[in-house]
Amino acid sequence: MLARASDPIVAIATASGRGAVGIVRVSGPQLAPLVHALCGRALMPREATYLPFRDADGSVIDRGLALYFPSPHSFTGEDVFELQAHGGMVVLQLLLARCLQAAAEIDPVGGKPRLAGLRVAEPGEFSQRAFLNGKIDLAQAEAIADLIDASTEAAARSASRSLSGAFSQEIHGLLEALVRLRMLVEATLDFPDEEIDFLEASDAAGQLVALRAQLAAVQRRARQGALLREGIKVVIAGQPNAGKSSLLNALAGAELAIVSAIAGTTRDVVSQTIQIQGVPLHVVDTAGLRDSDDEVERIGIARAWDQIEGADALLFLHDLTRSAQPDYLQADARLARTLAERLPPGVPLVDVWSKLDAATVTAPAHGIALSARSGAGIEALRMRLLEVAGWQAVPEGVYLARARHVQALKQVEEHVGLAEAHLAAHSQSLDLLAEELRLAQNFLNEITGEFGADDLLGVIFSRFCIGK
């Protein structure tokens, strides 16, 4: 895509299907002749004009609003031309075809290049143009897609903050602090015989400590933002008839899974995304875990273990109404040992005691006791899930972030930590200190796109929708 970044591009910028309004968007150099061909006249910059959109023979395709944004004052930094017509797909396809036809017919004027290279845009290419032309950085470009895909109000607001540059400003603040440190270290390397120790005189150690504190604050908010965007996968596991499907239905507020007193009713994975305080949780109900001779049930149990091994958190359900039965308790103990062996390290396990409304015994002190039927304990479980996810109730200060941002910040933290170690022995390790600071800066630059491989850009923008 990068090799074709100078081509003029066109696309239908609204979702497919019927709608009140549909938009055809063009971006590229010197679009004024195309504007005249479609509208029959020149347009005032950044001023919506209602007029007919004409075909090659002069017939009217549709009537609507036309807007022209001359370079560099546009979203992409190039000339941008938009046709806002009625939202029927046939109409929009006719306008798209007319743009391509008119561009091919425009003759060069004054030696200027033709628009014959106009082509249909690839996914994300308009946003990529904006990034390449310095209108937005990479974090802001990703925020455009995140805002479109936001599934909760909190996620949408956080994506909007990222799009406005809140996250990028934090990264630039870290970059400025790193650059100052690199300048001090480079000066010490360049003038090793000077009487003044640049690092001590400028309190490089203090600056590095302040940088680590600033980085930690950004990491906390980025992790919260990534949680808002990605959510976590919560798997419900336990013996047959422990109440797993009932719990999924209670959390989702809908009858998603079949509930029956017959053991082994759930044969396959049932999942649903729920929201708790704006945080998406992908809750997965699984088949009851036991030894079975039923081939279909065994397949379901195997799938259940696959889900457990890929979980971010596990709810281990225990049936309070059977807690006095020796066979049940023995099976539960065996299952607990197997879960401990197969659950990935670091994945939290929450013990949940179900059927509180029908139980004649007291639930153990650890874990959460609840009733999916009456709703008792459900809110406590919701709050526990937020705690397990690592959510902190500070949504107004959170900007949406991605897993790659969190990983990059983790790399920065590691290199800054190594830099601190080298600074403690700077007389022997100044070269290594300088290198660690350089690597930390590179990882920060990857977040905003000031430094990054072309293939990374290709992957990011190819996931955008057409017309963005």
Image (spheres, helix red, strand yellow):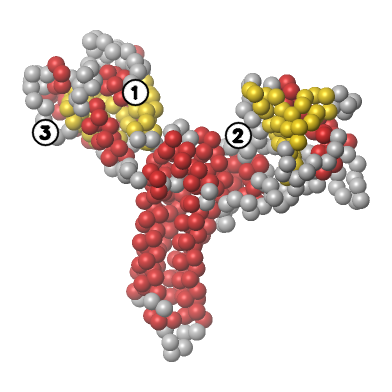
Cα distance between the residues tagged 1 and 3 = 26 Å
**Residue in the foreground of this view, choosing between 213 and 161:** 161
Residues tagged 3 and 2 counted as in contact (Cβ below 8 A) = no
Percent x, y of residue 333 = 15, 28
**Residue at 46% from the left image edge and 49% from the top image edge:** 405
Q: Which residue is mark 1?
A: 252
| Quadrant occupied by the C terminus | top right
Q: Which residue is mark 2?
A: 465
Q: Earlier in the sequence, mark 1 or mark 2?
A: 1
**Residue in the foreground of this view, choosing between 444 and 379:** 379
Depicted 56 relative to depicted 419: above or below = above
Q: Is residue 62 left or right of residue 238?
A: right
Cα distance between the residues tagged 3 and 2 = 50 Å
**Residue at 65% from the left image edge and 24% from the top image edge:** 20
Closer to the camera: disc 1 or disc 3? 1
**Residue at 34% from the left image edge and 33% from the top image edge:** 276
Q: Earlier in the sequence, mark 3 or mark 2?
A: 3
Percent x, y of residue 463 = 57, 37
Q: Is residue 371 left or right of residue 311?
A: left
How packed is label 2: few (under 14 Cα within 10 Å), some, or many (20 or more)?
some
The answer to whether one can see residue 395 in this image is: yes
Percent x, y of residue 385 = 28, 35
Q: Three-letter amino acid code at disc 2?
A: Cys
**Residue in the foreground of this view, choosing between 106 and 325:** 106
